[in-house]
Image: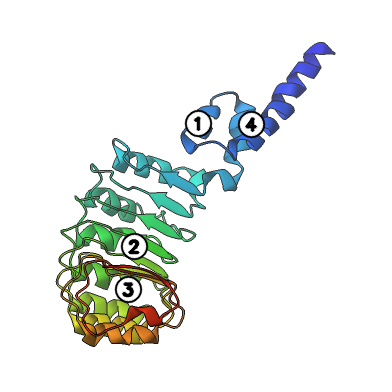
Amino acid sequence: MAAAADEAWCRETVPRVMELVSTRLPQREVCALLSVSPWCHRALTSNPKLWEVLDLHEAKKAGERLISALSLARYRHLKVVNLEFSQDIDDRHFLHLKEMGAILLEELEFLNLNACQRISDKGIDAVTSLCPNLRALSIYWIVGLTDTSIEHTVKNCKKIMDLNLSGCKNISDRGIQLVADNYQELKKLDITRCIKLTDDALQEVLQKCSALESLNLYALSSFTDKAYTKIGYLTSLTFLDLCGAQMRKFDISQFDLVCTYY
């Protein structure tokens, strides 16, 4: 009877406890728990809530680890992939995933590629083609990206609500025009240090993306009052970053929002 009780404890109680505890643990520790026992492995891998986030930020060999993870059934319901500052990841990893054919991240909502400098326009095309229902894309400080990346993104991902292009210095008015034309329900936009943009680009965004709630225009001294006066189109705006703005006659105090500027 004691042996049967011990086995029941190992088969049922321990896996259930591990499953409850795992919801509060970092994913790295959850992965470690998979090796506790076959029963724990089965209980944890069958709980899709535990595998909705794949966090590989600053990770070594992140590209290889991404490919390995996405080959596992438990990651088929991913909602978040974080590769921020994973410098060893490049186009070939995304191209490989695309060529695998069976990988399609239909439930992925947020992709963070911040500062992944080895990714080019080709890589953006490959990765966005895998996640058609993406709602948030962050490509902060990938300085080699061009308007072609925006073309790929608007073609592959129709539901973007949050777009961070901060530091993408080669994005021009043409790229922002694509954003304005295709993402008119956009809620958040960060174009910090997108230094090629002109008043014309900003006006397109302000006129067409009227649902914006957050807009970052940090370190963009090229914009003038000609564009800033169109901020009134954004009736839902609650946050605006104008640090570095060269405003002369425009009075931002008329708007009810959190504003950072000098």
> Label 1 vs label 3: CA separation?
36 Å
* Residue 201 falls left or right of residue 3: left
Q: Position of residue 97 (x, y in %)?
A: 33, 51
230 above or below 172?
below
Label 3 packing within 10 angstroms: few (<14), some (14-19), many (20+): many
What is the secondary structure assignment of the residue under circle 4? helix
Q: Position of residue 59 (x, y in %)?
A: 32, 38
Quadrant of the drawing holding the N terminus? top right
Circle nearer the viewer, 1 or 3: 1
* Residue 25 falls left or right of residue 226: right
Q: Quadrant of residue 111?
A: bottom left
Q: Which residue is mark 2?
A: 128
Q: Quadrant of residue 172?
A: bottom left
What is the secondary structure assignment of the residue under circle 2? helix
Q: Which residue is mark 1?
A: 29
User: Of marks 1 and 3, which one's residue comes earlier in the chain?
Assistant: 1
Q: Which residue is mark 3?
A: 154
> Label 2 vs label 3: CA separation?
9 Å
Q: Which residue is mark 4?
A: 18
What is the secondary structure assignment of the residue under circle 3? helix
- Mark 2 vs 3: CB contact within 8 A: no
